[in-house]
Amino acid sequence: MNSLEISTDISSHLHYMRLGSGPAMMLLHGFPENGTLWQSIGERLAKDFTVIIPDIPGAGQSSLDAETVSLEEIADSLKGILDKEQISSILLVGHSMGGYITMAFAEKYPSMVAGISLVHSSAGADGEEKKETRRKSISLIRKGGKKPFVQQMVPALFSEGFKQHNHGVIERQIERGLMLKDESMVAFYTAMMNRPDRIANLKGTDMPVQWIIGKEDSVVAPSAVMQQCSLANVNFVSIYPGCAHMSMLEQPDKLYSDLKEFGIFCYKE
Ligand code: MLT
């Protein structure tokens, strides 16, 4: 495993892992996570693919040298990694916020994208209700309430069945969430709130799109995502019963094999 670093406009330390060899995939984490969330699945995929796993600027070991950041700026920093690694064609796998970044990247750099996998994510923007919830969370974090925020938020990412039997996993995720700086949390929530609706970008696109949907996901509603998954010309749709927002922990074997199958498809010629 290689652990590498570059600097970009918004980050003086942009940390990422490079694993394996072959056609390239980038695994993007969501909120409040860092790249280690993807490590175990990344190591399995690395048998067939070059796998790049970044910590996005402001998460994990990557710095964020600005008070605010947009998803487009994060996409630019990921392009910096690909340029450094001399990768010109990439399958982007984005979990939740990582999927919102994936949509921004695909809009800016379409010729580099071999396919996109939206894992518990959506091409849509936040609705008013969601924005209001985010504003309240930002205000709580700014008042020093990161801990209660993370302790309440993280368990809600998992299905009831999983929660009952996996207390240790949830605790570790809470610890991981608490490692994010207050400023990064506020910056990410603001960036997500400000993202545009990119559903129209899917209509008629020849870029293959994979949809991983947790039937019990309460963060990204399956009903809303289902309306998007016939817009592109090629859609791989997988609905996971008994899974909520965290299939890489709740149902990792299934997610690994779906990502591998999609990766083989995207690079079939
Ligand atoms: C995530 O998992 O990245 C976030 O929960 C997404 C969101 O808040 O929309």
Image: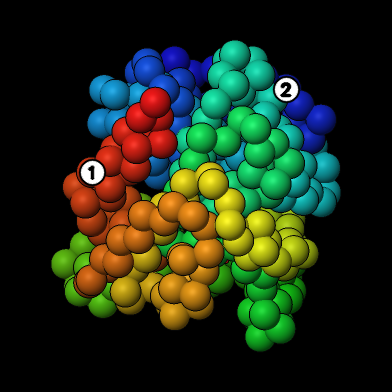
Q: Is residue 219 left or right of residue 269?
A: right
Q: Residue at x 69, y 36 (%)?
A: 109
The residue indicated by pointer 2 is: 7
Position of residue 194 relative to residue 139, above or below, is above
Position of residue 216 relative to residue 24, above or below, is below
Disc 1/disc 2 C-alpha distance (Å):
33 Å
Position of residue 23 relative to residue 254, above or below, is above
Which colour scheme appears in the figure? rainbow
Q: Residue at x 64, y 15 (%)?
A: 84
Q: Is residue 69 left or right of residue 117?
A: right
Q: Position of residue 30 (x, y in %)?
A: 52, 53
* Figure quadrant of residue 240: bottom left
Q: Quadrant of the N terminus?
A: top left
The tag on residue 257 is 1
Can I make out residue 230 in this image? yes
Q: Position of residue 230 (x, y in %)?
A: 46, 66
Q: Position of residue 120 (x, y in %)?
A: 43, 62
What residue occupies the far bottom of the structure in this picture?
129
SS for dot 1: helix
* Figure quadrant of residue 21: top left
Q: Residue at x 59, y 47 (%)?
A: 102
- Residue nearer the viewer, 235 or 101: 235
- Residue nearer the viewer, 161 or 96: 96
Please tell me which of labels 1 and 2 falls first in the chain: 2
SS for dot 2: strand
Mark 1, other Cα within 10 Å: few <14 / some 14–19 / many ≥20: some
Which mark is in front, 1 or 2?
A: 1
Q: What amino acid is labelled 1 in the image?
A: Ser
